[in-house]
Image (spheres, coloured by chain):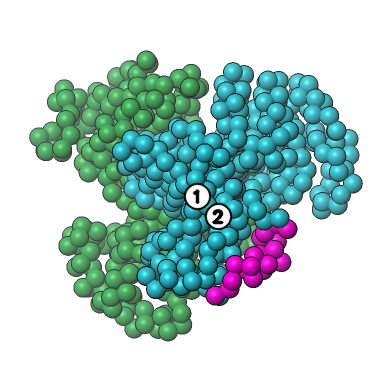
Chain colours: A cyan, B green
C-alpha cells in the first residue's frame, strides 16, 4: 500500500489533537483512501511535553528546511498559529512543491491572496477548512455541494468564547465581567481574551467566509469590527423585551451588487435558528439563491474537532493528487 | 472553453428546478469550473407543459438510447423518480460510460449495491447528494470533510411532510387528520400521503445515510419503520409534560459493534437541537468520534434546493473527470 508522508509544523494543542485523530482512526482513514498516511517529521521545540500520544523522538526537528527539503513529504500541515512565521513557512512549503493544510485563521485571513497565489504558482493544493468553525464543515461545502448557488448572505456565530459569555449574560443574568471569569475558569476564554472579546478572531474568520462566498478579499482590518465588551445587561434585557436575543454575528452580504462585511453584536428574533446556538457552540447560516437558507452547527473549536477538519483536508488532497488510484 | 454535455432523464418538478438553477446561475457555475455546461438531451414525454423555462424542442427525446449512445454526453442526470425504470436506466447509462447523478432516494436505497457496482465496473462517478435532505449538504460532507471520523450515530428529520404535521399537532394542538389536511392544502403532503406518513420515504433515506456513515447496506424493507399515523394528541401532550417533543426520527447507530437502524416517532428533550427543527424543515444530526456533534439544517425538498444539490454533484464530477484542468 502506497504511503503518503506528511510534515507537521507545530505539536501544540491542535497539532496533538490532529496527531491523535490520525492514530485513533487510522484504520478508517486508510481504508477510505486505499493508501496509508504517516506524519514523518514534526517541527516542534518542546519535545519533552507529555501529550498522551507516542511520538518517535526521531520525528522532531527544529529546522523547517528538514521538512521542506525532504522529497518524500507531499503534504505540510501548519498548526503553529499566528500570522508569522506561519505564513512565510506555508509559502516556503508550497515553493518546495508541498500541498499545505492549515487551521490558522489569522494567517489565512491576513495573507489569503499570497497563499492562494503560491498554491496556484506551484500547482499544489492549499486547504484551510479548520480555520472557520473548527470541525463544522462549511468552507468545503461552499465550494462543492453548494457551488451551483449564488450566495446573498452569510451569518456566523464563529467565536465560542464570546457566544459563551453572551449566553451566560442572557440566560443567567450575569454581568460581562462575571461571565468572562466563568469562561476563563472553564477554559473557554484565554487569560488575555482580547482577540476574542474585541471581535478580532471573528473578523479573521469573516475575511475567509467572504472570500469563499463572494470571491472578494476584504482584509480583517478593513472589516468594521465591534466586540462584546460594551454589551450591558440593560441592552440584553431590552432585547429580550422585544422578543430578541443579542449574538455576536459575523455578517457578510451582497446587496445591490456590493459586498459588505461587519462583526458586531446584533439582535436576532428569538425564533431565528441562530438563537438556538448557545454557549461554546458555533454555527454558520448561509443563504443561497437556489438552496435557500441552511445552517451548520457544532462545536467550533477544540483539538479533536479541529483535527477532524485538518485530516479531512489532508485526505481530500491525497485523493485528488492520486487521482483516485487508491479508490475502492 | 470546453463544454461538458449532459443528458437529463425527466423534466418534471425536480428536473425543471435543476434546469432553472443551471440557467439562473450559469455564469457562477461556468466561472467556478472554467468550463461550460449544457443539458443537450432530455428524456421527457410531456414536451408541451409550460415550465417557465425555455427549452429547445430539439432537445427532447422519447428514447433513452438517444442519450446513452450520444458519445458527446458525459453525465446523465436521472430525475424520473421511483425505483423503475430509473434504476435500470441509471445502470444502462453507466454501462455506456456516463457518470450518473440522481435525486432518487427510492432507486438509490433499493439498488444501492448494484448502482455502486456499475459505477466501479465502468470507472464512472455515481452521485446522489440530493437524495437525502434535498439541498442540505450531508452525504458529500460525510465522505469528505468528516471522513477522518468514525461515526457513532446519525439522527435525521428527513421528511418534511411528517415534520410539518407533527409541528402543527404540537404547536397548534391539531389532530392528525386536521394537520394532514393543512399540509395537503399547502402542498407539503401529496393526495396519497402514505409513503411519507408511514415512514417509507424516511426509511429510504436512512438506508442511504447508513451506507455512508457505516459502510453497511440495510435495505429499506429491513429497517423497522413506524410512521406518524398513530401519534395521538394525548401522546404529544404527555411528551410535553415531560419537557419533551415527539419527532419522526430516522436513526442509525453503532453500538457494541452492531449497526442498527430504525424509523419511528421518538421523544427528544426540548433542548435537543433537533427540537428546533420545525414545519417543513429537515436536519441531520451526526456524531463522530473526532468532531463531536454536528447538525445540518435547511429545507429538505423543493425543486430549486434539490437542483442545487444535483448541480453540485455535476460540478464535482466535471472537476474530477477533468482533473482540475479548467481550474483557476
Residue B84 appears in the picture as rendered: no
Tell me whether the residue at label 1 lies in contact with that at label 2, contact meaning CB atoms closer than 8 angstroms. yes
Q: Position of residue B156 (x, y in %)?
A: 44, 59
Q: Residues within 10 Å of mark 2 (few under 14, many from 20)?
A: many
- The image shows residue A10, relative to residue B246, as above or below, that is above
Q: Are marks 1 and 2 on the same chain?
A: yes
Assign a secondary structure to mark 1: strand
Residue sitting at 23 percent across and 60 percent down? B189
Whether A185 is among the magenta residues is yes
Q: Residues within 10 Å of mark 1 (few under 14, many from 20)?
A: many
- The image shows residue B122, relative to residue B80, as above or below, that is above
- Where is mark 1, residue-wise? A263
User: Could you tell me which chain the residue with mark 2 belongs to?
Assistant: A
Q: Which residues are magenta?
A: A173-191
Residue sitting at 54 percent across and 75 percent down? A173
Residue sitting at 52 percent across and 39 percent down? A222
Question: On the picture, is A229 further left or further right than A242?
Answer: right
Query: As rendered, which of B232 and A137 lies closer to the eye?
Result: A137
Q: Image quadrant for the C terminus of chain A?
A: top right
User: Which of marks 2 and 1 precedes in the sequence?
Assistant: 2
Q: Residue B68: which quarter of the image?
A: top left
Residue sitting at 53 percent across and 63 percent down? A231
- Where is mark 2, residue-wise? A227
Q: Position of residue B260 (x, y in %)?
A: 53, 61
Amino acid at each position: 500500500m502506497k504511503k503518503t508522508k506528511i510534515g507537521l509544523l507545530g505539536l501544540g494543542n491542535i497539532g496533538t489533537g490532529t496527531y491523535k485523530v490520525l492514530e485513533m482512526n487510522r484504520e478508517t482513514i486508510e481504508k477510505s483512501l486505499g493508501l496509508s498516511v504517516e506524519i514523518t517529521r514534526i517541527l516542534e521545540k518542546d519535545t519533552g511535553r507529555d501529550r498522551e500520544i507516542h511520538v518517535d523522538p526521531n520525528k522532531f526537528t527544529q529546522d523547517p528546511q528538514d521538512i521542506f527539503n525532504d522529497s518524500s513529504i507531499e503534504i505540510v500541515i501548519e498548526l503553529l498559529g499566528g500570522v508569522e512565521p506561519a505564513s512565510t513557512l506555508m509559502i516556503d512549503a508550497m515553493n518546495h512543491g508541498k500541498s499545505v493544510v492549515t487551521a490558522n485563521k489569522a494567517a489565512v485571513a491576513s495573507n489569503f491572496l499570497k497563499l492562494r497565489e503560491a498554491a496556484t504558482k506551484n500547482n499544489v493544493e492549499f486547504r484551510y477548512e479548520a480555520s472557520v468553525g473548527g470541525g463544522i464543515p462549511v468552507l468545503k461545502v461552499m465550494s462543492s455541494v453548494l457551488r451551483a448557488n449564488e450566495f446573498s448572505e452569510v451569518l456566523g456565530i464563529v467565536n465560542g468564547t464570546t457566544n459563551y459569555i453572551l449566553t451566560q449574560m442572557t440566560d443567567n443574568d450575569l454581568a460581562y465581567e462575571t461571565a468572562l471569569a466563568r469562561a476563563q475558569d472553564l477554559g473557554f476564554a484565554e487569560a488575555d481574551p482580547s482577540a476574542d472579546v474585541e471581535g478580532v478572531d471573528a473578523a479573521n474568520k469573516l475575511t475567509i467566509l467572504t472570500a469563499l462566498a463572494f470571491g472578494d478579499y476584504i482584509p480583517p482590518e478593513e472589516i468594521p469590527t465591534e466586540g462584546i465588551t460594551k454589551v450591558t445587561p440593560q441592552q440584553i434585557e431590552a432585547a429580550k423585551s422585544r422578543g430578541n436575543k443579542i449574538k455576536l454575528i459575523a455578517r457578510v452580504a451582497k446587496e445591490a451588487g456590493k459586498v459588505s462585511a461587519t462583526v458586531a453584536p446584533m439582535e436576532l428574533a428569538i425564533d431565528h435558528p441562530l438563537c438556538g446556538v448557545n454557549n461554546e457552540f458555533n454555527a454558520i447560516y448561509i443563504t443561497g439563491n437556489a438552496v435557500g437558507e441552511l445552517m451548520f452547527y457544532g462545536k467550533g473549536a477544540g483539538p479533536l474537532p479541529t483535527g477532524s477538519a485538518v485530516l479531512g483536508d489532508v485526505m481530500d488532497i491525497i485523493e485528488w493528487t492520486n487521482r483516485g488510484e487508491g479508490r475502492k
